[in-house]
Image (tube, rainbow, N blue to C red):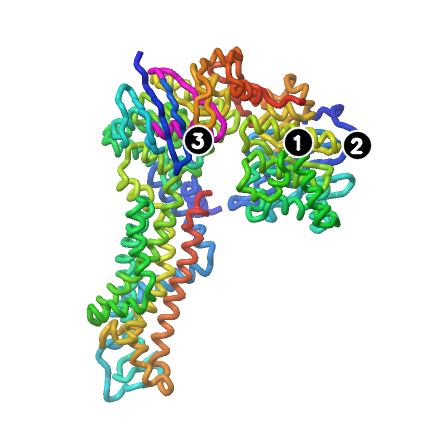
Amino acid sequence: MNGNRDAQPKGTLLEVDDLRVTFPTRTGLVQAVRGVSFSLGRERLGIVGESGSGKSQTGRAIMGLTPPQAEVSAKKLSFDGIDLLSISPRQRRALRGNRIAMILQDPKYSLDPVMTIGRQIVETLRTHEKVSKAEARERALEMLRAVQIRDPARVFDLHPHEVSGGMGQRAMIAMMLIAGPELMIADEPTSALDVTVQLDVLNILDRLVAERGMGLIFISHDLRLVSSFCDRVVVMYAGKVVEQLKASELRDARHPYTRGLLNCMPRIGFERHPLPVLDRKPEWAA
Amino acid sequence: MTAAIAIDGLEVVFDRFRALKGVNLEVREGESYGLVGESGSGKSTLLRAITGLAPVASGAITVNGKALGKTRDKAFYRDVQMVFQDPYGSLHPRQTVDRLLQEPLAIHGISDGEKRIERALDEVGLGKGFRFRYAHQLSGGQRQRVAIARALILEPSILLLDEPTSALDASVQAEVLNLLEEVRRRRKLTFLMVSHDLAIITHMCERLMVMQDGEAVETLTASQLIGHRVSEDYTRNLLRASEGFVRV
Amino acid sequence: MTASDAGSLSRREWLLSDRPASRLQARLGRAYVAWRRFSANRLALVGMLIIIALLVVAAFADVLAPYSPTVGDLKNARLLPPGAAHWFGTDDLGRDIYSRIVYGARWTLYVVVLVAVIAAPIGLLVGTVAGYAGGWTDAILMRITDIFLAFPKLVLALAFVAALGPGIENAVLAIAITSWPPYARIARAETLTVRNSDYIKAVQLMGASPFRIVLRHIMPLCISSLIIRVTLDMAGIILTAAGLGFLGLGAQPPLPEWGAMIASGRRFILDQWWVAAAPGAAILIVSLGFNLLGDGLRDALDPRSGDQ
């Protein structure tokens, strides 16, 4: 592995060593994640890869949302000194949402369609903290304001289908941040949004992460976006980490996969016909 | 030079919602033309109006010099074909690639089917090995290649592309874009391509129209866009957004 | 590994190949995958065995039945209990009940197959046309369907038989006329989910006529849910036919139809229970068989699980 050890920060929040996720299928066992190792401080870490690279399953395994038929194993998977694999499901649930939160790609599917946005945020808060209804409402409104929703009192009473995609994703972020988590996992949080809205949402996320000193894992297929947003980047291919590097050093990426991925996207002002394509080598997956 | 597609004052209305509000467009023969915009801008509706999948409320569409009426005849579909956005939804789940490619030939009563199918598969870089597979036995990129082969098998002169790569991985996207450029050069096709991604449009197209809320914002050449010589703020916003995240 | 093992292994690989080399291989491969899914369900296999047994019994009734189903020994063999000579006993006319049940399998199959052959295509056609055409066509066709659905099946069938006259052919017709509406509903629902999909739009953009789209692209997608539903309904059809037979409006004496047999056994049900119980058990087992088969087919053919 080409881990840039010196790029690792002090004060580790999350440590992942040799994480494996195995799915049973009709034709035998399939490993979606095959020995992923990295550590995270209070920083923004990007996990980049194409479909089937195991990036989402890595995020889900940390979150404890792996489908029950699959098996998760690791030499070490610890969050703030807590061994995530040995604690009870109940303790895991308490951790989830309270200290570790996750944002998914499409707010349409991750918000409850029959509950108002405000009530969802209030309920999330009240399951993790003992606060009065009035205070919960006050804090929810404050949170909606923090994600730059201009008229929080109105949005509070709306149902998810009544708001736009960008607004829904902001509400989702508000809901995830209300309990004050220390680690946030964002799985393609902006892929379903229009480009201009995408930047607004990323700005909000960026500011909140910086202000609250959270650790962020940003999972995406878009290498360029991730490298402009994160401090460090982990590049995954076929369930393995092929390269870890500082986002600012992406141009000097050594692995041919990372370089190929950067190269193959069309860029404004760089005329290349035909576009360079990725020549996948079997040894990358070995 | 004649216009391959000429659109004048096109209005499309779905249940009182005006999806297109009087759009004009001229695509020259052999040209590759791009439509850029965000969701709800009406760019896909424009393609669907041309093919007859969206209801035209008013305005005129002319294709290869022929004015289109309410319905499209078979000859129209031999001139104009379309590639859809989602390769997982655009192939029939119960048909093999062979069946999919045979269908247009059967509809138009074309006899040299065997040869055409083999040639079409070769042209999109799939080869004979893929001929009897079902859609679920193909990857996303392979499915989109089959969709392109299906569109090409009637030998149209105009290809409408509705975000043909937005559902694909970046590396597969490059392969499909290269393939599209190659078939355009070889067959001298006219492209009308829709995308939300300015980089893809500038890569693929010579001219483009930026759309917002069912209206044209401005019309540019690719080199104007590359040189940032744009006059509308909205286009400028799009350009900025396409350059990635900038910490403020 | 023996040679035959190697042979069967490679045959399986050929069937499961991701890159079939011919139309035939692709089709067989698909069928094999469905069969594997079906045969993984033990109960479905039991159901299939029951139905195969029914087919065999119906085909070889002449060989399997020791006595005539219609002519009995009135003098010596009236209402005999089950024994070595008459396995299921005899009825009030001295006929061997076992032989009557064996021949009755033919009539059961006759009813079930004819109803399926008449009702399923009508339902499929009405449903897909209504779903694809939409608008007025849809409204008219579905209101007609609703009218049929508004009456209880047996009552409607009774009315038809009363109008057409009793007899097994008319019973079949009446059941068929009353059982297509649910199929139309299913086919319409299925059509509505696919009619706006890109692959149907793609065929429209090939210039295909609506007729061709419905027939060649939409109907094949509806057929599997319909087969499942028809199989599950078979039990109901048998029971309705039996019900009509029981009321004297279906099969007429001396036809060995199971429902009619129960009806005639009713009079002795307390003293000579076997006269009604034997055909009752036959109906029970065959209905169960169709239900189990239908359940297995649902797992094997369901388009939602069939893609991956």
**Disc 3 and disc 1 on one polypeptide chain:** no
Residue in the picture at 54% in, 45% down:
A25
Residue in the picture at 49% in, 46% down:
C1
Mark number for residue C125?
Answer: none
Tell me where residue C28 appears, x and y as whole percent.
37, 44
Q: Which residues are magenta?
A: B27-50
Q: Which residue is mark 2?
A: A11
Callout 1: SS: helix
Residue C264 falls in image quadrant: bottom left
Check if mark 2's residue and mark 1's residue have beta carbons within 8 Å. no
Mark 1 crowdedness (10 Å alpha carbons): few <14, some 14-19, many ≥20: many
Q: Is residue B199 left or right of residue C103?
A: right
Please identify the residue farthest to the bottom as the structure is shown. Answer: C75
Amino acid type at image mark 3 = Gln
Mark 3 chain: B
Tell me where residue A260 appears, x and y as whole percent.
56, 21
Check if mark 3's residue and mark 2's residue have beta carbons within 8 Å. no
User: Does the stretch in magenta take in B49?
Assistant: yes
**Relative vertical location of residue B199 with respect to residue C22 in this rendering, above or below:** above
Amino acid type at image mark 2 = Gly
Mark number for residue A205?
Answer: 1
Mark 1 chain: A
Amino acid type at image mark 1 = Leu
Tell me where residue B100 appears, x and y as whole percent.
34, 35
Count of all numbered marks drawn on residues in the image: 3
Residue C214 falls in image quadrant: top left
The alpha-carbon separation of the residues under discs 3 and 1 comes to: 30 Å
Tell me where residue C195 appears, x and y as whole percent.
36, 42
Mark 3 crowdedness (10 Å alpha carbons): few <14, some 14-19, many ≥20: many
Residue A222 falls in image quadrant: top right
The label nearer to you, 2 versus 1, is 1
